[in-house]
């Protein structure tokens, strides 16, 4: 009830603030967008229109200059006909450009007038547009007429008439220029008006955004204060009491005289403190541990609760279920939970019966360790190897029970198998974690090495791989086979790894023959006697087809025979993945 009630109040505060922020943002976006639209119109229409009008004036002057050069070319003795012709072409080209510029200015002004989304002085713009049409039409007609008379006088070499016509043309051109300048001045005035409008809109947008933001902040604070005030008043008393408990004063209780959710929480908290007082010793001693063997060891050795980390020789085992990913893809969540629970139960039992400590479950993987103070130094490697043998023996049980759990009898389970890695070495042992949750665990290179060996089973097609140090401590009770010299990720020196085949004296004749042939092939392989190695690995496969290490080494030998290793090769194989 308290969670729902307080959550509603907090969500109400958050929703109210979000609504205010969104409203402010939308308003700001709209106003900024309007200013941007006005700026776009100024940039895309007003300024280009002024530019076109300026170009009309410039073209008029250039055309007048070309006309004078035509007169000069004709008045020379003899006349410069080529120069006259060139300047006449320039004159006519400038005349056409004036029409182009006037048309472009007309289109831009019309676009401003037609755009109803922006404020503009449409009357002034319409007047400017009309004056441009009049200027280009009527006035330039008179200029062309005078220019035609001037050109006719030049062609007749009547220079006196040409000079008179040139004077009239200059007068008309000056009038033309004055009118263009007047149109430009009026267009600039309208443009400045548009700039003033933009500035006004920009100022209004800034002021409006500031006012709305301030109002939103004030309203939001008032709203938040009103809603949270009711919670704070009741929580403050609860907080004062909990601070005393937090300081370790469990003899105090919380007095909150309310009947709402906070009052119910206070009553529950008081009951919890009473229980804490009763179970304080149990909670402090065992509350940070989960594994039953660790709890048992701590009961027998209470001083371990304060023990710092120690370096000890330990044996670590990693186990992973091969084929779990493909197996789980076709399962329902309920079926997957059943399979996982049964698999972990089946594989955990050999670890516990062989005095191992299950450190953690990692998905379908299991991490366990053996060593002091739970197992003597002389025994932990052997117990780990015996647990691995029993775990492998239980694969058949797991394969048989999975279809029964899922209710799909007849489902092939051959892909379901184990991969186990075992390593013995020095590790940091101790209670590691936080103030509220601890784990008595092991850390160090031996843990990483055991994990790497579990993964290396993929390379050799084996179910288990153990380090040389592990086998050296447990070989008296086991039948093993040396597999290879490997350099795992993170190491620079090779380690000899072994496969545990079973308990001492319990191998079948074909298993013994397989081991002998494989070891002979391995010796030839390291001496780079490739043909002998191929023969021995082939013989091992004939005796036991499907033997993973033999298949792996046979292929590797063929590759090395085709591409021999560098001089000084020590027969090791690097496993980077």
Image (cartoon, helix red, strand yellow):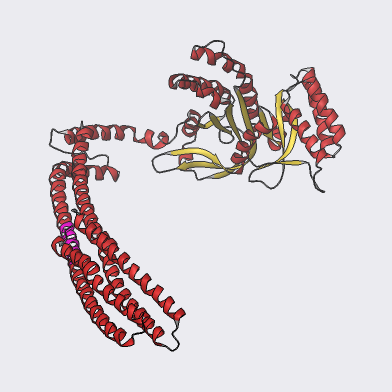
Viewer-side residue, 216 vs 267 = 216
Res 394 visible: no
Is 509 on the left or on the right of 466, as rendered?
right
Measuring from the top left, give residue 518's x and y in whole percent: 80, 29
Is 238 on the left or on the right of 369, as rendered?
left
Measuring from the top left, give residue 188's x and y in whole percent: 21, 71
Q: Is residue 119 above or below residue 506?
A: below
Res 241 visible: yes
Name the quarter where the C terminus is drawn. top right
Viewer-side residue, 291 vs 284 = 291
Measuring from the top left, give residue 386's x and y in whole percent: 65, 25
* Count of number-bearing discs: 0
Which residue: 44% across, 89% down?
77
Which of the 4 quarters of the picture holds residue 243?
top left
| Residue closest to the far bottom | 77
- Does the magenta portion include 350? no
Q: Is residue 444 above or below residue 197?
A: above
Which of the 4 quarters of the picture holds residue 159?
bottom left
Is 373 on the left or on the right of 493, as rendered?
left
Q: Which residues are magenta?
A: 195-210
- Does the magenta portion include 203? yes
Viewer-side residue, 230 vs 417 = 417
Which residue: 80% across, 39% down?
560
Q: Main secondary structure of the magenta part?
A: helix
Q: Is residue 474 above or below residue 233?
A: above
Which of the 4 quarters of the picture holds residue 51?
bottom left
Name the quarter where the N terminus is drawn. top left
Which residue: 19% across, 36% down?
8
Measuring from the top left, give residue 332's x and y in whole percent: 45, 20
């Amino acid at each position: 009830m308290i969670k729902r009630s307080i959550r509603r109040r907090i969500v109400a505060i958050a929703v109210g603030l979000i609504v205010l922020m969104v409203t402010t943002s939308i308003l700001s976006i709209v106003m900024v967008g309007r200013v941007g639209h006005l700026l776009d119109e100024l940039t895309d229409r007003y300024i280009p229109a002024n530019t076109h009008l300026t170009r009309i004036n410039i073209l008029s002057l250039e055309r007048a200059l070309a006309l004078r050069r035509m007169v000069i070319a004709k008045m020379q003795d003899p006349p410069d006909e080529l120069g006259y012709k060139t300047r006449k072409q320039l004159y006519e080209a400038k005349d056409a450009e004036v029409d182009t510029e006037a048309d472009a200015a007309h289109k831009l002004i019309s676009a401003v007038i037609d755009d109803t989304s922006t404020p503009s002085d449409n009357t002034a713009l319409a007047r400017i547009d009309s004056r441009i049409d009049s200027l280009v039409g009527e006035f330039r007609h008179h200029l062309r007429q005078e220019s035609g008379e001037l050109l006719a006088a030049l062609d007749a070499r009547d220079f006196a008439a040409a000079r008179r016509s040139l004077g009239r043309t200059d007068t008309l051109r000056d009038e033309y220029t004055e009118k263009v300048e007047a149109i430009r001045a009026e267009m600039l005035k309208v443009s400045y008006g548009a700039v003033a409008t933009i500035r006004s809109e920009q100022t209004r947008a800034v002021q409006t955004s500031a006012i709305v933001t301030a109002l939103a902040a004030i309203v939001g604070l008032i709203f938040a204060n009103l809603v949270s005030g009711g919670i704070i008043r009741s929580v403050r008393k609860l907080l004062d009491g909990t601070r005393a408990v937090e300081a370790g004063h469990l003899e105090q209780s919380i007095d909150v005289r309310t009947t709402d959710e906070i009052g119910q929480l206070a009553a529950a908290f008081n009951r919890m403190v009473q229980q804490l007082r009763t179970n304080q010793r149990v909670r402090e001693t065992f509350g940070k541990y989960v594994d039953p063997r660790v709890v048992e060891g701590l009961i027998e050795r209470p001083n371990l609760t304060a023990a710092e980390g120690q370096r000890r020789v330990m044996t670590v085992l990693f186990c992973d279920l091969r084929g779990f990913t493909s197996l789980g893809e076709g399962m329902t969540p309920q079926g997957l939970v059943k399979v996982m629970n049964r698999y972990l139960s089946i594989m955990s039992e050999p670890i516990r019966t062989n005095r191992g400590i299950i450190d953690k479950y990692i998905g379908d993987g299991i991490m366990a360790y053996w060593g002091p103070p739970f197992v003597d130094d002389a025994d932990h490697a052997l117990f780990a190897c015996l647990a691995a043998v029993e775990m492998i023996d239980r694969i058949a049980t797991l394969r048989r029970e999975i279809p029964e759990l899922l209710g799909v009898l007849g489902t092939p389970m051959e892909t379901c198998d184990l991969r186990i890695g075992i390593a013995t070495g020095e590790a940091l042992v101790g209670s590691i974690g936080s103030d509220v949750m601890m784990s008595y665990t092991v850390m160090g290179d031996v843990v990483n090495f055991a994990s790497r060996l579990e993964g290396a089973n993929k390379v050799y097609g084996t179910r288990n791989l153990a380090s040389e140090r592990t086998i050296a401590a447990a070989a008296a009770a086991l039948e093993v086979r040396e597999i290879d010299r490997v350099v795992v990720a993170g190491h620079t020196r090779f380690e000899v790894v072994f496969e545990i085949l079973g308990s001492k004296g319990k191998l079948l004749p074909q298993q013994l023959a397989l081991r002998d042939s494989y070891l002979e092939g391995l010796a030839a392989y390291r001496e780079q006697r490739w043909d002998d190695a191929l023969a021995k690995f082939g013989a091992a496969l004939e005796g036991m087809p499907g033997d993973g290490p033999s298949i792996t080494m046979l292929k590797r030998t063929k590759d090395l025979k085709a591409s021999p290793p560098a001089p000084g090769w020590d027969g090791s194989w690097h496993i980077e993945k």
